[in-house]
Image (spheres, coloured by chain):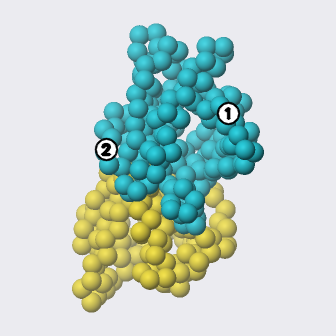
Chain colours: A cyan, B yellow
Amino acid sequence: MNSTYRPDPKLDLSFERIVDVPRELVWKAWTSPEHIKQWFTPAPWKTIDCEIDLRPGGIFRTVMLSPEGQEFPNAGCYPEVRENEKLAWTNALAPGFRPASSSAVKTEETGNFFFTAMIALADHGSGTKYTATVIHADEASCKTHADMGFEDGWGKALDQLVELAKRM
Amino acid sequence: MNSTYRPDPKLDLSFERIVDVPRELVWKAWTSPEHIKQWFTPAPWKTIDCEIDLRPGGIFRTVMLSPEGQEFPNAGCYPEVRENEKLAWTNALAPGFRPASSSAVKTEETGNFFFTAMIALADHGSGTKYTATVIHADEASCKTHADMGFEDGWGKALDQLVELAKRM
């Protein structure tokens, strides 16, 4: 789909930032397990494991660790991979495009919900216009995600990504 | 993913047939709304409407009509489109890769379930090796689909496709 996707305010969460690192480095940070582990979760959360098979239908799996020591595994796949330009991943499809188990949809009990995240990258001077959009099935999932602190969390993670990219 | 996908017998339904029409015609029959309406549902079922946006994330929507006159709308998207070679579509993602609403997962009440269908085409002499594989989230969905007569239904539809292709 277009990288100029226009979010639906009831169903989507989105933020846009200009960052002063080239998009090739942002892409690298998003597509290597070693890099993901260094920036993906805002401290003091950690990402302690990551698996990436960077092709449509390939796995994107992470294990996050809460400050209290609880592990949160997430597995999904990439529906779309356009190098240095657009990366989409979803937990609604398991690797190989297999529908995720419906037992994962327990919004009220566990806070789990399906979403598709899209990262769009465009040149902006010597830096990058970075647009993250997360789309949901329904308003309830979107609100749950917003209440979890989507923008703050993704923003802090992006700060960590930029810091890492500058050291690359 | 590979077109030589090996099905999981507990989660997947699959059948392979050699058909005596070239794969370019099979592809056309699968990717044009006018053609879909002519072969997609085994008679006396009909497909009375179809919408196709043939790109990753693009819509694949059909409306089937039962012999009793009940309409069954289905909408999903294509996670993968490789011309004349591989077509994948799923009802687990709405157009634009948006996760489908979880209210669509009502296996027991409505027989609805999520699946991803993959059509793989390969040359076989002057004809085509046609492999249809439908993958599910869990064994229950797979069994429901099998009990609905997957192989018989998809086989009859393929007969109709071949008949149409020969008239193209």
Q: Residue at x 61, y 13 (%)?
A: A166
The location of residue B9, given as percent across then percent down, is: 67, 72
The amino acid type, in three-letter code, at marker 2 is: Pro
Q: Residue at x 36, y 76 (%)?
A: B41
Q: CA distance from mark 2 to mark 1?
A: 30 Å
**Disc 2 versus disc 1: nearer the observer:** 1
Q: Residue at x 59, y 24 (%)?
A: A161
Give the camera-side residue of B110 and A146: A146
Chain under callout 2: A
Give the camera-side residue of A1 and B125: A1
Image quarter where the N terminus of chain A lies is top left
Residue B167 visible in the snapshot: no
The location of residue A94, given as percent across then percent down, is: 59, 55
A64 left or right, relative to A142: right
Q: Which residue is mark 2?
A: A9
The amino acid type, in three-letter code, at marker 1 is: Pro
The location of residue A92, given as percent across then percent down, is: 52, 56
Q: Give neighbour class at mark 1: few <14, some 14-19, many 20+ (Cα, 10 Å).
A: few
Q: Which residue is mark 1?
A: A44
Chain under callout 1: A
The location of residue A81, given as percent across then percent down, is: 51, 38
Q: Residue furthest bottom?
A: B68
Q: Residue furthest front?
A: A68
Image: B131 above or below A127: below
The image quadrant that residue A67 belongs to is: top right
Image: B119 above or below B13: above
Q: Give neighbour class at mark 2: few <14, some 14-19, many 20+ (Cα, 10 Å).
A: few
Image quarter where the C terminus of chain A lies is top right
